[in-house]
Image: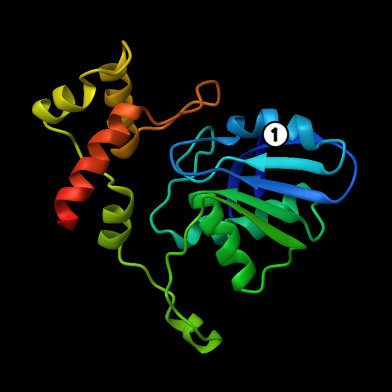
Amino acid sequence: MLLETARGPFAVEDFGGCGPDLLLVHGTGHNLAVWAPLAECLRGHFRVAAFDLRGHGQTPQDSSDPEQYWRDIGAVCAALGLRRPWLMGHSTGGYAVTAFAADGGDCAGIVVLDGFVLDPRQTPEERQAWHLPREQLWDLFRYGWRATPAEVEACGAGHRPGAGRLAERGRAGRSGGRRSRAEPFWPSRTAGCCAARRWKRSRW
């Protein structure tokens, strides 16, 4: 359902449960539906909720910079009525919950799954200069990158049937395409292979 917050409407899911509040934050190209199996396992220990980040799933909000992801967390928690929740984030969601906690956000603790840190600052005084250039973010996530036909052919050789179609879906996700709630996105081995080869060439 869409929930109105102080930062606009967000698609949310309250999985219910008993215990401390827990908010799940997905990664780039995914949506809250990817948490459903884990939420079912955790409902006996936590009250579990999740939401679609900006530019993902059924949330109508668009994203223009990475800070929006973590700044939205407080507003979503308040609208859901979560009190000092535990925060669990995957990938970009891991960055978001880490940044939220580092900025003094009210949470009991964080759990980061395959996350990363976008900001290299070491002291609290440097928080005033929090900024990540759009070009750096796009390069980090390879937004807009498209494989050449030769790369798709080379990476697809030997993979399971339909790998070429999955690579096309991966490129659509990187170029800004949205994923529906009913279709969680799992990156294909083909797309990952292409990205890894390009990364190796850029490194060496």
Depth order, front residue of 203/44:
203
Q: Amino acid at mark 1?
A: Leu
Q: Which residue is mark 1?
A: 38
Q: Specify few, some or many for label 1: CA neighbours under 10 Å numbering under 14, 14-19, or 20 or more.
A: few
Q: Locate the C terminus and report the quarter of the image it occupies.
A: bottom left
Image check: 125 left or right of 165? right
Question: At which x and y percent is residue 184?
Answer: 51, 27
Question: At which x and y percent is residue 134?
Answer: 30, 60
Q: Residue at x 66, y 50 (%)?
A: 88
**Residue 81 vertical position relative to residue 71 in the rendered view, above or below:** above
Label 1: element kind: helix
Q: Is residue 176 visible?
A: no
**Residue 109 vertical position relative to residue 102 in the rendered view, above or below:** above
Image check: 40 left or right of 30? right
**Residue 18 vertical position relative to residue 84 in the rendered view, above or below:** above
Question: At which x and y percent is residue 66?
Answer: 43, 59
